[in-house]
Amino acid sequence: MTSIQLNLISHQTTDGFPYQHLHIEMTTPDGIITPADLKGLKIPPNIQWQQGVIIEGKAPIWLYAYLVHECHPATWVGCYDPRLGAVVVSTHTHAVTIGSILTLELPKIIKN
């Protein structure tokens, strides 16, 4: 069993803009992970690269950096900040720009 679980959910912003929500969950009893936990971590195989991805969840900055890198093929990538919304940090489209803030309600996470 991996110490990091990634849940992918099809969702949309409050304006109806479709995206994929990548929720991070630590599965260790204490919620602590180490850089070694990156080995073997895979993006969910059903990701649709032609859509944007918003990464969200309680995790260290180095895990976010890794996931932004791994999600680079997506049309755009945003990181969720509960104070702001989703901040776009990477884009390959004119539909959203770097630094754009997308408003959203977090999707309900269904645990397996």
Image (cartoon, grey):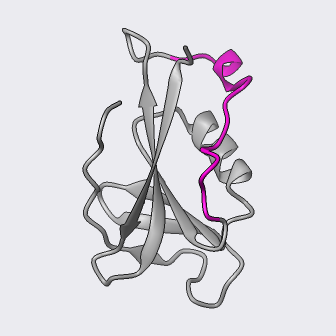
**In the image, is residue 36 above or below residue 76?**
above
- Residue 15 on image: x %, y %: 31, 84
- Residue 2 on image: x %, y %: 56, 18
- Residue 7 on image: x %, y %: 45, 42
Task: Specify the segment rendered in magenta.
Answer: 33-48
Is 86 a magenta residue? no
**In the image, is residue 42 above or below residue 34?**
below
Is 40 a magenta residue? yes
In the rendered image, the residue lying farthest to the bottom is: 94
In the rendered image, the residue lying farthest to the top is: 29
Residue placed most toward the observer, 91 or 11: 11
- Residue 69 on image: x %, y %: 73, 51
Magenta stretch, overall SS: loop
The quadrant in which residue 26 appears is: top left
Residue displayed at 28% across by 57% down: 106
Image position of 89 (left or right of 92): left
Image position of 74 (left or right of 31): right
Residue displayed at 31% across by 33% down: 111
**In the image, is residue 97 above or below residue 42?**
below
Instruction: Give the number of marks.
Output: 0
The quarter in which the C terminus is drawn is top left
Residue displayed at 36% across by 72% down: 12
Residue displayed at 42% across by 65% down: 86
Image position of 104 (left or right of 60): left
The quarter in which the N terminus is drawn is top right
The quadrant in which residue 61 appears is: top right
**In the image, is residue 28 above or below residue 42?**
above
